[in-house]
Structure formats: C-alpha cells, structure tokens
Image (cartoon, rainbow, N blue to C red):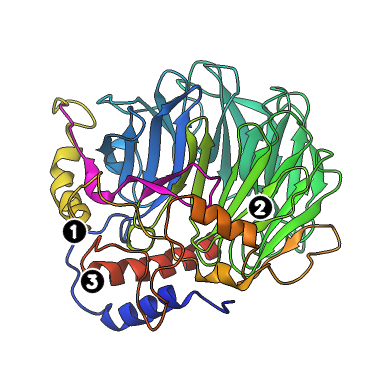
Amino acid sequence: MRSGFPSNRLCGALTVLLLSALPAREARANGTFPAVSQLVSEPGDPTHLALRTTFGVVFSTDAGANWNWICEDALGYTNTLPAVALLPGGPLVLGVPAGITRTQLAACDVAPVSGVTESVVDLSVLPKNPRGVIALSVDYVVHRSQVWESTDAGVSFAPLGDPLPDFVATTLDVAPSDLDLLYVSGMPTRSGAKGLLLRSEDHGKTFVEHEIPGSTGGAWPYIGAIDPTHADKVYVRLGEVPGRLEVTVDGGATFSERLRLDYEMQGFALAPDGQTVVVSSPAVGTFRADTETLDFEQVSCSGVSCMLWNSAGLFACGDQSIDGYVVGRSLDRGASFQRVLDFGCIHSDFGCASTTSVGSTCPALWPPIQMLLTGFGACDPNAPPPRVFNECLAGGAPSGGGPSTGGSSVGTSGASASGADSVAQGGHSSGGKKNSGCSLTNVQDAAPPWLMLGLLLSYVIRWSRKRTRD
C-alpha cells in the first residue's frame, strides 16, 4: 500500500522546486509547461480527433497517425482552456471567454459565431443530430447562466429558455436516448447552498432543481456522462478532495455515492454500450466498475487527467514525463495504455495563405513551440510502449468496504488480484524496478532530466490550479 502523494511524483516535484529559480529554456504557452486536458472525437467517425492543450489545439483526421497544430491566437483565445467539440462533418467549435469560435478541421480560417457573447464553459453535441450542438455560458459578473442551441452546425446560436439566475453552471449534457432531456450541473450563489443537477424534459425551456449531496464549498459538480439507454441514470463527479462519484438512477431525485478517492477525480469515461465505467486520478491510479454493480476495483497505479471512450477504444490524456505518452489508447478497459501521440510527433503543416486567420498568426509562433515539443525527444511511433509501474497492485484488495450506499471507498490502497491480472494481460510490464528514492520507473528516456523535472512541477501547479478552479 502507498500513503500520501505517489513518491516518484513527490520527489520530482520537490526537486524541481529547488530548480525553479533557474532561467527558463523555452517559451511557455499559457504560462505553463505543455500539457493536455481534453480529447474529443467526431460523432460517428472516431478517426477525427481534437486535443486541447496549453499551447492551442492539435487534431488528427487519420485515427491519430498524424497530428497538426493550430495556435490559440488564431482560435480566438489566449491563456485559457476552452471547451472543445467536434461536430459531424468536421466543424471544430470552441467555447471561449467571449463566446464561441468555429472552424472546419484542417481549414485556415476561424470565425466567431453569432448569438453568444458570454463565457462558454461547456459544449455538447446533440446525439443523432448532425447539425445540433448545445452550449452553456456563464456571466460571472451577475452570476447568471444560459443554455444555447445551434441547429446549423455551430454557425449561430439562440438561447434555450430563460437565463438561470444566481447560478454558476459547470457542465451540460443531452440524454443520448431522449434529445429533449437535458441536464445542467452547477452551484447556486447563495451562501451554504449545495450543488445542483438541473433536469429539463422540454429541451431546455424549463428546469427542475435537484440537490447533490456533498457538493458544498469547493466540491463543485460536473456531469461525467448519461447512460446511453437509461436517460435517468447520470454520473456526477465532485471536484475538490476527496474526489467523489455520485450516481442517480431517477433523474436527480436521489443520489448514491459510488466511489471516493483520497485525491481529485479527473478522468471519467463511460463505455459506448454503457456497461463499464472507468475513473482516474493522476495521484492514485485508475479504477473500473461494471455499471450494474458499480463496485470499483483498481486496475492500474497510473492515472490520467482526461478520457474519451468511443468505438475505436478508450483514449486518455497523459503526462509525457510520467506516463510516456500524451495521448494513449487502451484495449483492456483502462488497465494499460498504448502510445498514440508524443509531443515530438506534433507538426504544423499550415499551407494557409497569410490573409487567413491561421496563416497570418500561427507560422510565426510555431518555431518556439516546436523547439519546446521536440525537447521531449524525436518522434518515434515504433518505440516500445511505456512501462507501467504497478507496485500498488501487489497489496491485494482495496481497504474498506465502502460507504453504506454500496459504493467503494478507495484511498492509496492496492487492488484485487483480478485487477493485477488485467494489467498483465495488457502487454505492459507490471514489475519493473522498485520505486525507491526519486526514480521514475515508467519513463523511457523520453525527455532530458531538466525537462522531466520541470514537467513534474507543472503537474503540481496544474493540480493546485484545478483545485482552485473547481
């Protein structure tokens, strides 16, 4: 069993704190070291992927074989992390502080769309509707939220229903089995209020409020997913520490805590068939459950910050210096991930005229970004997959029997033997070197030591910032 922050990350973080006063060797985007935080795919075409990073958006139109970069300046934002959505046919839509911008994948021009002028915090593509997308905006000055809809593939938006006063929204989703059923999560502004799950059965015209237990103070609620066949079953992740997963099977009328972690819960993915759920924390690992029982087991000591599950597999956002990949794909339901993208494999084949928004802005910004990314090593798609360090799985089953609701309470404990078997079957070594001192056991010379140490500091900073933002 392990206690506290994983030793390899903690040692690296403490070391780099001593080095942080040294002059920086690279240009930093968003004021941080390069990192990724959201991955989306085009509905109906898992070969089209878009990845949000701290230095812009990178996208692939060939299932991850090639990735191209668009700078954040051309996309209409700076120093923020926008909500990202891919629509059928390839339009890329971004929620930015001034509203929404839109471009076609591989296009050269990005334009603001009409209708929305407030900060957009989330986007949701309408299932089975190739031209429909829902947006969620927040006016942080007056603490008012608004749901919007586009019926022309993101070209323009109109409000759905009245504004939601005294309410700071966080996420929204549309039930895959009922396009008129919408859910919005967020926090009322009145003192001492609990977080809410808002449910609309008339496509956003009116909402019914449901309190989410435990969602007070910094524990803001975020919708993880809606069951694809059971529109009343909703998974809600609570921010802050401890990380908790609340599940409702009656549209928000009641909730059950199904998983609690000692650290923040960041990655969440529901299988396309709705039968398996995977939850992850970079601090304590990855956990999996059958959705019928929701009894979680730890399947890996490694954790990721975001996940996407589509027909091509389970994808994850990784930390290059720790996980050995930027985007990984799992074929064993989260027990292990194979490398899909390294930072060094990102390129910028613009071919855009200087009169376009991309061509006039991004080429001049690419050289320092390229120098930074290639500092992680040359692109080598045929390199061996990253090793997985799974000493935490050697201790047996997780401690504790879970809360009275029937969920699982998991700290920095081990996992069941079946979880260890799943990792072994994934083709990754579960043994490797013992984790002693400050050694990194799952990195294969992907970057020079100074860069690995710097990225470990970035992890600590991002973890701290995420806690503050949530």
In which quadrant of the rendered view does residue 377 lie?
Answer: bottom left
Q: Secondary structure at mark 2?
A: strand
Distance between the Cα atoms at labels 2 and 3?
Answer: 35 Å
Q: Which residue is mark 1?
A: 375
Q: Secondary structure at mark 1?
A: loop
**Residues at marks 3 and 1 touching, judged by CB atoms closer than 8 Å:** no
- x 56%, y 78%: residue: 4
**Residues at marks 1 and 2 touching, judged by CB atoms closer than 8 Å:** no
Whether 327 is among the magenta residues is yes
Q: Nearer the viewer, residue 175 or 453?
A: 453
Q: Is residue 120 above or below residue 374?
A: above
Q: Which region is colored magenta?
A: 326-351
Q: Position of residue 157 (x, y in %)?
A: 53, 24
Q: Nearer the viewer, residue 361 or 323?
A: 323
Q: Quadrant of the C terminus?
A: bottom right
* 186 sits to left or right of 135: right
Q: Quadrant of the N terminus?
A: bottom right
Say if residue 144 shows up in the picture: no
**Residue 237 circle label:** 2
Q: Position of residue 315 (x, y in %)?
A: 46, 42
Q: Amino acid at mark 2?
A: Arg
Q: Which residue is mark 3?
A: 449
Q: Between label 2 and label 3, give the one nearer the viewer.
A: 3
Q: Earlier in the sequence, mark 1 or mark 2?
A: 2
Whether 376 is among the magenta residues is no
Q: Secondary structure at mark 3?
A: helix
Q: Amino acid at mark 3?
A: Pro
